[in-house]
Image (cartoon, rainbow, N blue to C red):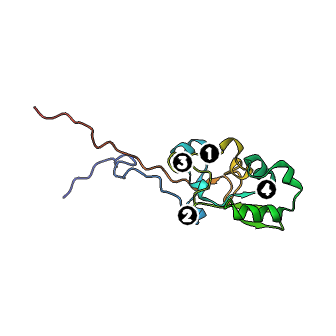
């Protein structure tokens, strides 16, 4: 007969450490409840979502001049599409969608640092994320890869 302990082991004793799973952008149920500490450990996955902007955002960014505000938005959209800055324009809502890089990164995301290169003048969509967006209050968090130092010296046996 096998002896059983009187008390079960503490909760978590036999469990593996829980890892934070990376969200899938197109599966909103995988997004995590947003907390401000998440941004520093993320690969900036929100910067791979389509960025919808209004004319005031384009002026703030500096790709449209203030004097162009009176021009037909359709004409501005055509110019920005030719320049590779705008992917599409919705005339009904007057919303421009910024072009993205081939890997879906925003044009203004630095590839190495993964920080926004126009942070101080970024569009309202970015300023208000994740309060607004596909799943308000949630973030498509993807943790940065942990780089391990392979040159760590260990104590050798004597």
Q: Nearer the viewer, residue 134 or 78?
A: 78
Q: Could you tell me how far apart the alpha carbons at marks 2 and 1 are, in whole angstroms?
A: 18 Å
Badge 1, how many Cα within 10 Å: few under 14, some, many 20+?
Answer: some
- Viewer-nearest of discs 4 and 1: 1
Residue lying at 60% horizontally and 63% vertically, measured from the top left = 28
Residue 91 at x, y percent in the picture = 82, 67
For the residue labelled by badge 2, is the local secondary structure a helix, a strand or a loop? loop
CA gap between label 3 and label 2 equals 15 Å
Depicted 37 relative to depicted 89: above or below: above
Secondary structure of the residue carrying tag 1 is loop
Label 1 or label 3, whichever lies nearer to me, is 1
Q: Position of residue 114 (x, y in %)?
A: 54, 48
Residue 126: give x, y in percent of width and height: 68, 50
Residue farthest to the top, as pictured: 158
Q: Which residue is mark 2?
A: 102
Asked whether 50 or 154 is in front, the reply is: 50
Position of residue 97 in the picture relative to residue 56 (left or right) = left
Q: Earlier in the sequence, mark 4 or mark 3?
A: 4
Which circle's residue, 3 or 2, is located before the other in the chain? 2
State which mark lies toward you, 3 or 2.
Answer: 2
* Above or below 27: residue 69: above
Q: Give the labeled residue for mark 4.
A: 54
């Amino acid at each position: 007969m096998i002896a059983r302990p009187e008390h079960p082991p503490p909760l978590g004793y036999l469990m593996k450490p829980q890892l934070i799973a990376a969200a899938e952008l197109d599966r909103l149920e995988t997004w995590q409840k947003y907390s401000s500490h998440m941004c520093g450990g993320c690969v900036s996955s929100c910067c791979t979502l389509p960025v919808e902007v209004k004319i005031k955002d384009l002026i703030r960014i500096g790709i449209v001049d203030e004097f162009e505000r009176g021009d037909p938005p359709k004409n501005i959209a055509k110019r920005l599409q030719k320049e590779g800055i705008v992917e599409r324009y919705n005339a009904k809502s007057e919303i421009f969608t910024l072009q993205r890089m081939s890997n879906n990164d925003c044009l203004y995301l630095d590839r190495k640092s993964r920080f926004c290169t126009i942070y101080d003048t970024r569009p309202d969509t970015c300023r208000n994320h994740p309060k607004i967006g596909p799943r308000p209050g949630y973030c498509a968090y993807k943790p940065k890869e942990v780089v391990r130092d392979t040159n760590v010296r260990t104590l050798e046996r004597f």
